[in-house]
């Protein structure tokens, strides 16, 4: 068993070996620029990009022409939110989002608020769930968009995106979803759920870092976006810059692999996660954070009456996990997600998020239960 055991698949995932194999030729022999339309080097690269576009589209039930490649989901989210806001500036200036969104959304909206936009931040209950009644009451006549994540990165909570999309539509607003943690893990279909824009990221689904995509629904009502990166006019003029062909090929391959395995893998991880959670909840003073509607591979547990820092330092010697601290494990601030759910600072800091993935085995889970139980009990005895 290789230590520390990796339990941080929501932070990032290793590239699938088949993804690496698919990417390599695009660094060496097939190195053309996908925008070079006058010679075979360019055509080969362009064909590879278009094949990847099809693969990403198929994973989420979209059409290839609705997929736009970016360098990260953060960039995709910025384009969706700021691009839409800029296109409607001076007309519709109200946004709605959820207090527990990723910083990629919250900071982007904060930027717009500084520019004169107005935003309603929906609270969540102790389980991290929103109230649809409260959401309904938040719409105004000038609401331009609702931004709500498909799955939360800390708790794994799934939001009712279909109902949210319907509600946005009924109020003549757009619905943007950050689906970074859900895509490739559970089946998703943009047409069934009715979302207008959706962001996904390759490195969360066994693809490479530095490549992601934005789904932009075609059809009525038309989604007008103002480009946030200008230049050579790539990606329908919405995202200039030479395309990252190896990365895009990797995202395409990761998408087709996920499509094949996501149902069986999510079932396998659901069982492992439940075993892990049952084991951890036997520890005195432990509590689960999150609702019953959650991603199958995420486990978020807090431990009362122990300090967060020593807990994380001890745990990370043998298990690579995330904590309940904001953004990084060395932060002294508790996670905004956990505090929005009502956790006090000390409990939020004494929280571990374990996210399981392809490499996780039954033995890893047994080890994690035993090790975490021993560390928590040691820390309790010492205090
Ligand atoms: N949204 C969520 C929910 C995430 O978990 C992350 C990554 O941690 C992002 C957005 C940002 O993705 P990227 O790393 O591709 O910018």
Image (cartoon, rainbow, N blue to C red):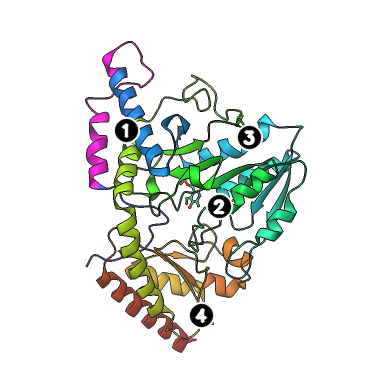
Left or right: residue 8 versus residue 240 is left
Discs 1/4, front? 1
Q: Is residue 42 visible?
A: yes
Specify the farthest residue to the bottom: 381
Which segment did they paint magenta? 17-42
Lower sequence index among marks 2 and 1: 2
Discs 3/4, front? 3
Report which residue position mark 2 lands on: 161
Dot 3: within a 10 Å radius of its alpha carbon, few (fewer than 14), some, or many (20 or more) residues?
A: many
Report which residue position mark 3 lands on: 84
Report which residue position mark 4 lands on: 306
Q: Which residue: 76% across, 39% down?
A: 116
Q: Is residue 334 visible?
A: no
Q: Is residue 227 magenta?
A: no
Task: Give the vertical position of 108 relative to 311 (above or below).
Answer: above
Specify the farthest residue to the top: 38
Report which residue position mark 1 lands on: 246
């Amino acid at each position: 068993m290789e230590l520390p055991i990796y339990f941080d698949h929501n932070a990032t995932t290793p590239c699938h070996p088949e993804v690496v194999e698919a990417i390599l030729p695009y660094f060496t022999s097939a190195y053309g620029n996908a925008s070079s339309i006058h010679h075979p080097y360019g055509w080969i690269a362009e064909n590879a990009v278009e094949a990847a576009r099809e693969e990403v589209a198929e994973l989420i039930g979209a059409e290839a022409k609705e997929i736009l490649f970016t360098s990260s989901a953060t960039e995709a989210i910025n384009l969706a939110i700021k691009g839409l806001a800029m296109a409607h500036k001076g007309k519709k200036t109200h946004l709605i989002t959820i207090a527990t969104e990723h910083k990629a959304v919250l900071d982007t909206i904060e930027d717009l608020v500084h520019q004169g936009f107005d935003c309603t931040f929906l609270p969540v209950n102790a389980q991290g769930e929103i109230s649809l009644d409260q959401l309904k009451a938040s719409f105004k006549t000038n609401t331009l968009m609702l931004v709500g994540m498909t799955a939360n990165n800390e708790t794994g909570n799934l939001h009712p995106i279909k109902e949210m999309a319907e509600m946005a539509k009924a109020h003549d607003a757009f619905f943007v979803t950050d689906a970074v943690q859900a895509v490739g893990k559970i089946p998703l279909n943009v047409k069934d759920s009715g979302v207008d824009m959706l962001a996904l990221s390759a490195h969360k689904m066994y693809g490479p870092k530095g490549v992601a995509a934005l789904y932009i629904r075609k059809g009525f009502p038309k989604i007008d976006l103002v480009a946030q990166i200008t230049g050579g006019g790539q990606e329908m003029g919405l995202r200039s810059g030479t395309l990252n062909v190896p990365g895009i090929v990797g995202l395409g391959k990761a998408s087709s692999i996920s499509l094949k395995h996501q149902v069986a893998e999510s079932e396998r991880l659901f069982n492992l996660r439940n075993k892990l959670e049952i084991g951890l909840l036997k520890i005195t003073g432990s509590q689960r954070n999150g609702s019953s509607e959650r991603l199958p591979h995420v486990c978020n547990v807090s431990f009362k009456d122990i300090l967060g820092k020593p807990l994380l330092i001890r745990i990370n010697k043998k298990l690579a996990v995330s904590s309940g601290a904001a953004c990084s494990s060395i932060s002294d601030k508790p996670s905004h997600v956990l505090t929005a759910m009502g956790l006090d600072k000390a409990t939020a800091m004494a929280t571990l998020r374990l996210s399981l993935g392809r490499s996780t085995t039954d033995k890893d889970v047994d080890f994690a239960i035993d090790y975490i139980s021993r560390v928590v009990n040691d820390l309790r005895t010492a205090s």
